[in-house]
């Protein structure tokens, strides 16, 4: 060879070598490719194209994201191991309705940092082999049908910052080892079947920013050690199974922006904690926590507060008049307490629910004209549900029956005429039917997202096939509490039929079908069914179930049907804000042998007078000037 041909040869060699190294540097490690083949099979992921390098950033390894809905990305790092191969560092397969199981072979992706399989329809347990994925910092499996307990090996993921397991069917106790995750920031475990106490090791989770355990079956008290979580912004303990009291040390969590504790188990009384050092607090929900005592004057110093809910407690005394001056407040729910005295006059841009208290309101007073203030029924603590403030009852003739097509139009079914009920709801809404013989009251806002709006009225998302579908195509729903109040019924015994159908959750194999709606039913103030799940009792979604309650006694011409969300069920499936009570229709009929015989004892006039006198006796006339 002469020099020039030698040069050419060397040049060719070097070009070949350069292209080889360049090629090698963008190629997945062969073992990881094999692992991905096994992983695809297990997850039921059918559209990965193994003819294309998984680290090529090409379809279908990387596809454009639909924010918050679908993600489909395998992300590699070609320098992470220094071995001239690319390695998978992230797998994001969100919202794809995958129907397989979690593959133990995931542990062959040794450099994996993020695994996000949110909102699919995956079944089975978390493989314990995943405990060797020690580079993982985000681990998201929310919105699947996963079962079993959290493997103790997950505590080996020492780099973990985000653990999202909510909206699944996980069970068992939480492994104490989770308390050794010294970098954990977000821990979301809501809507599972977890049991046992929160492990004492959790006292060390001082890096926590968000902790959610709603809708579980935990036991024991809310631990005092939560006061160690001084970085926390969001703390949600609703319908968790934990009991009170609320630890007073919670006042040390001064970085809180969103605090929601509700529906504590047990009957121990709580004090309202000191809150005035929480200078960033946006939302405060301490509902149904057995809190007694009075409302604190200094809440006014939390100028960031937008949403205050201290409903369904045992708060007494008066509302501090400064509450009406809190300009940032958008919603204030003091529903279901023992509050007394005068009612401040509120700005028009705040929704105020004061229903079920013991206020002094006169019929016809100015406050009764405020559309944004709900004062429905002043009597929560007392046994005289016959008195309704602000309402002038006229009952020309006591009725023996009541039919309402909740949220729908007037309808005739089985020869019975169901009243229409298409008034638009609101966060604090009381509305009496024009006929005057019934009313509804609704309380609350959907906190996860307001995408449905404050006037959300459910409609069926799929075709309904029952013969009386007109009763079920529309319904009335509420984020917290929904009451129907029948007036002017003849005293006596009744059969109450409550008609339900789940019309907001799809019947298919999508993650949306994993939504669970759960609420409680009260009649005449007494619980008649806890943890009612429409779809479960109807044998599926889009099917009707009529809950019949017999021997319901009407003794002061009034019937109260109350539905209440006690923090149970999913809150974000199929969409955020699909939860809480929902009812399709109501039919109530006297079960006395001679319907009307009781009313025959008294003339229609005396009933009207009786009802009005009831209201007047309950009310102390107070005109307020703030
Ligand atoms: C790949 O990994 C290396 C080593 O860990 C890191 O320095 C680099 O930032 C990573 N590259 C990307 C794009 O994340
Ligand atoms: C997890 O860590 C424990 C020690 O804490 C070790 O015995 C076990 O083998 C580890 N498990 C895995 C799957 O890495
Ligand atoms: C957490 O709180 C407990 C008391 O509940 C205390 O004994 C412990 O030292 C605290 N731990 C940390 C890591 O701050
Ligand atoms: C509270 O939040 C602020 C601002 O986000 C942050 O600077 C501070 O470190 C936090 N405090 C604690 C105790 O985490
Ligand atoms: C909550 O309390 C009720 C009784 O009040 C009890 O039946 C139920 O088991 C308790 N739940 C848990 C998770 O402890
Ligand atoms: C709350 O109730 C408990 C138990 O009945 C009682 O001991 C306590 O004094 C009450 N607190 C207030 C402020 O009323
Ligand atoms: C406390 O409130 C609950 C409902 O939230 C109620 O059942 C109970 O009777 C109240 N206790 C008192 C002493 O009023
Ligand atoms: C309500 O209106 C007042 C003025 O009347 C204003 O200062 C305040 O910011 C408004 N609040 C909200 C929550 O919009
Ligand atoms: C309701 O308020 C009246 C005074 O306005 C009071 O006499 C009565 O005891 C209160 N009822 C309850 C249950 O607090
Ligand atoms: C409430 O009133 C009904 C009917 O008058 C009566 O049967 C019941 O015992 C009362 N309940 C209480 C707790 O006083
Ligand atoms: C709701 O149900 C009715 C009655 O079956 C049907 O006509 C209508 O198409 C359904 N709506 C949707 C969105 O499927
Ligand atoms: C029903 O009972 C209430 C309270 O016992 C009484 O005031 C009212 O007059 C009765 N109404 C009829 C129609 O009997």
Image: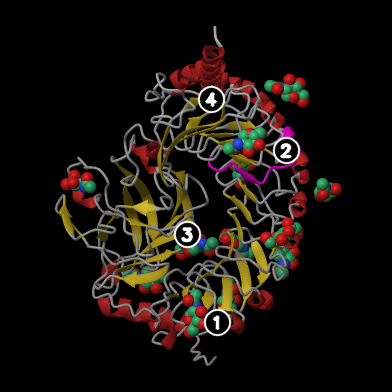
Q: How many marks?
A: 4
Say which of marks 4 and 2 sits in front: 4
Q: Nearer the viewer, mark 3 or mark 4?
A: 4
Q: Nearer the viewer, residue 284 or 387?
A: 284
Q: Confirm whether the magenta stretch covers residue 181.
A: yes
Query: Distance of mark 2 from mark 1, alpha carbons?
Result: 44 Å
Q: Which residues are magenta?
A: 177-191
Residue position for label 1: 324
The quadrant of the picture occupied by the C terminus is bottom right
Residue at which label 4 appears: 22
Q: Earlier in the sequence, mark 3 or mark 4?
A: 4
**Who is closer to the viewer here, 325 or 48?**
48
Determine the residue located farthest toward the front in the rendered image: 2
Q: Which residue is pictured at 74% across the width and 33% down the height?
A: 177
* Sequence order check, earlier mark of 4 and 2: 4
Q: In the rendered image, which residue does mark 2 sit on?
A: 181
Residue occupied by mark 3:
525
């Amino acid at each position: 060879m002469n020099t020039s041909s030698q040069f050419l040869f060397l040049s060719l060699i070097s070009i070949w070598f350069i292209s080889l190294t360049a090629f090698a540097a963008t190629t997945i490690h062969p073992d990881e490719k094999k692992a991905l083949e096994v992983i695809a099979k297990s997850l039921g992921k059918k559209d990965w194209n193994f003819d294309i390098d998984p680290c090529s950033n090409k379809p279908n390894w990387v596809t454009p994201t639909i924010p918050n809905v679908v993600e489909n990305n395998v992300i590699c790092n070609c320098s992470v191991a220094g071995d001239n191969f690319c390695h998978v560092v992230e797998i994001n397969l969100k919202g794809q309705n995958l129907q397989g199981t979690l593959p133990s072979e995931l542990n062959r992706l040794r450099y994996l940092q993020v695994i996000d399989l949110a909102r699919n329809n995956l079944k089975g347990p978390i493989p314990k082999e995943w405990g060797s994925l020690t580079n993982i910092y985000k681990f998201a499996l929310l919105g699947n049908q996963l079962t079993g307990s959290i493997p103790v090996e997950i505590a080996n993921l020492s780099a973990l910052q985000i653990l999202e397991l909510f909206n699944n069917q996980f069970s068992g106790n939480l492994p104490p080892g989770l308390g050794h995750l010294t970098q954990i920031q977000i821990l979301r475990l809501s809507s599972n079947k977890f049991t046992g106490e929160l492990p004492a090791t959790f006292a060390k989770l001082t890096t926590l920013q968000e902790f959610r355990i709603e809708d579980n079956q935990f036991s024991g008290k809310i631990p005092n050690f939560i006061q160690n979580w001084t970085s926390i912004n969001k703390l949600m303990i609703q319908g968790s199974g934990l009991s009170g009291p609320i630890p007073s040390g919670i006042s040390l969590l001064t970085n809180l922006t969103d605090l929601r504790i509700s529906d504590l188990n047990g009957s121990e009384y709580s004090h309202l904690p000191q809150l005035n050092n929480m200078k960033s607090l946006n939302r405060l929900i301490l509902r149904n926590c057995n809190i007694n005592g009075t409302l604190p004057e200094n809440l006014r110093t939390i100028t960031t507060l937008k949403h205050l809910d201290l409903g369904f407690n045992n708060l007494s005394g008066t509302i501090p008049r400064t509450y009406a001056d809190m300009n940032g407040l958008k919603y204030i729910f003091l529903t279901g307490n023992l509050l007394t005295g005068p009612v401040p006059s509120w700005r028009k841009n705040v929704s105020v629910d004061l229903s079920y208290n013991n206020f002094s309101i006169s019929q016809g007073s100015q406050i009764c004209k405020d559309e944004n203030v709900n004062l429905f029924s002043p009597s929560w603590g007392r046994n005289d549900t016959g008195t309704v403030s602000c309402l002038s009852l006229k009952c020309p003739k006591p009725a023996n029956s009541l039919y309402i097509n909740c949220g729908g139009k007037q309808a005739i079914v089985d020869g019975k005429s169901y009243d229409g009920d298409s008034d638009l709801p609101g966060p604090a809404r009381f509305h009496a039917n024009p006929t005057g013989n019934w009313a509804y009251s609704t309380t609350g806002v959907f906190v996860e997202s307001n995408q449905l709006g404050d006037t959300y009225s459910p409609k069926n998302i799929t075709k309904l096939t029952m013969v009386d579908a007109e009763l079920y195509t529309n319904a009335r729903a509420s984020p917290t509490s929904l009451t129907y109040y029948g007036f002017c019924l003849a005293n006596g015994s009744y059969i109450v039929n409550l008609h339900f159908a789940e019309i907001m959750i799809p019947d298919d194999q999508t993650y949306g079908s994993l939504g669970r709606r759960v609420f409680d039913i009260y009649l005449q103030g007494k619980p008649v069914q806890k943890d009612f799940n429409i779809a479960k009792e109807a044998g599926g979604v889009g099917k009707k179930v009529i809950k019949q309650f017999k021997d319901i006694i009407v003794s002061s011409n009034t019937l109260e049907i109350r539905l209440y969300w006690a923090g149970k069920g999913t809150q974000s499936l199929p969409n955020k804000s699909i939860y809480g009570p929902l009812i399709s229709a109501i039919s109530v009929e006297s079960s006395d042998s001679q319907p009307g015989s009781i009313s025959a004892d008294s003339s229609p006039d005396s009933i009207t007078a009786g009802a009005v006198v009831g209201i007047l006796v309950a009310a102390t006339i107070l005109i307020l000037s703030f």
